[in-house]
Image (cartoon, rainbow, N blue to C red):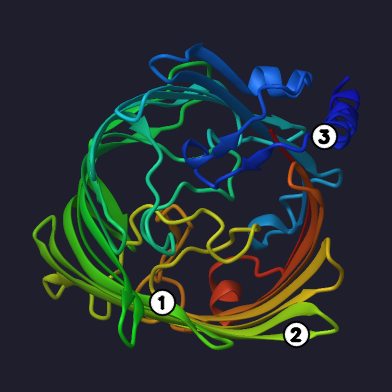
Amino acid sequence: MKKYYLIFIVVFGSAVYPQQINEFAFLRYNDVISIDSTNENFYYKIKQIAISEKYKSFLYFGGENRAQYQYFKNENWDEANRDDNGFILNRALFYGDLKIGTSFRLFTQIQSSCSISRLDPNPLEENPLDLHQLFFDISLRNLKLRVGRQELYYGSQRLISVREGPNSRQAFDAVKIMYQSKKLSADAFYSYYVKNRFGNFNDKIDPDTKLFGLYTSMKGVKHFNNIEAYFFNLQKSESTFNTFSGQENRNTVGSRIWGASSNWNYDIETAYQFGKFDSKSIHAWTFSINNSFTYVVNKRIQKIGFKTEYISGDKIQNDGTIETFNPLFPRGAYFGLAALIGPSNLIDIHPFLECQLTQKLNFYVDYDIFWRASENDAIYQPNGAVLFNSSNSTSKKIGNQLGASFEYTFNKYLSFTLEGTWFNSGPFIKDVSNGKDILFTASTLTLIL
């Protein structure tokens, strides 16, 4: 039955190709929809429903489905974790968006994340049906108040993300005030993290995880193009770094400069963290550079680039301070869809190449080299949990990762991606685990409506 479901996605996605103006956004509440009311196509009729022409009240609908096959060889660097057939992860999202004039809006989104043949799935992979977003907006000129369950997304997603890579996206129960002008935007929010749980309609806030934030962005700044500055405060009743656990109250201040100059693209970000972890003082920091050069070959856009980042780790244990950088709520697939390690206690060198082979087919390849920033600290999972602590190794080299993918876009509604990752284990991984190299492959079919 499940294979027929996937066939239906392909056929339906190919057949639905209306000519209206539909701009699908990464955050679906930012979709731009303009429909010709004289068109009798069924898709047009259900996409927008006029409730009151007089009060400019409309009800919009949209959805998406991502079907993804994944296969690991030596998952978690252990040949004992064997699954010869791989597994399927499927994520479906459906939203309804009620807009009354320009001053009021009610947005809701349902999420269904399912796994097929996955051995021991976690709640991010298996969360059959839940309320992902439900918020209302009240707007007055350049100000907007948003209250309810919502996705948060800022900057390069290094710290606050929707967690697109995993099977379940990330949400917060939040109160947010937004200011928007032509060149300046500013957000202030207070939120609780929403924790995914097995079952239906049972995702709840985690009362032990609070996040407060201020984020500003300025466009068109002379010599810099775009500048962003932010402050976040994270409070958790219990966190674990390396071999220590305790209550965490962490502040993050940072800035990002990004833009383009001719064919050169640049993205530079730095952040510093301070606060308290149990009885310890927090002093942590990160610095990243993402540079790329774009050029054209046979009317096709190509890009060659280089990323590098330093993410601090704890240098001396039991000295009254902790220097492990906490990435807060980063994108889940931080170093590729395989999501093997996370951005804490890390030095990363990362060249990459993007090639537009045809108008619809793109090819991407990248190579990561990983070291621990401190030999006295652990390496961490993408969600910030300890992956391997430092007690059994003094080696810094974690390993090398080669990734490649092909992405074919049938149209704005349907795309297909084929990708693979090879992780070559370094001395640290071999010291703390069975140290097998990991091979990961995945194919993804995405339909957006």
Visible in this render: residue 93?
no
Residue 405 image offset from top left, x and y in percent: 77, 65
Q: Badge 1 local density, few (<14 within 10 Å), some, or many (20+)?
A: many
Q: Distance between the residues labelled 1 and 3?
A: 36 Å
Q: How far apart are marks 2 and 3 (CA)?
A: 31 Å
Q: Badge 3 local density, few (<14 within 10 Å), some, or many (20+)?
A: many
Secondary structure found at label 1: strand
Going 45% across and 72% down the picture, which residue do you hit?
392
Give the residue number, with chain letter if any, for mark 3: 13
Secondary structure found at label 2: strand
Q: Nearer the viewer, residue 63 or 400?
A: 63
Looking at marks 1 and 3 on the same chain, the residue that comes earlier in the sequence is marked by: 3
Would residue 438 appear left or right of 381 to someone viewing this image? right
Residue 401 image offset from top left, x and y in percent: 66, 75
Q: Are marks 2 and 3 in contact (CB under 8 Å)?
A: no
Quarter of the image where the C terminus is located: top right
Disc marking residue 387: none
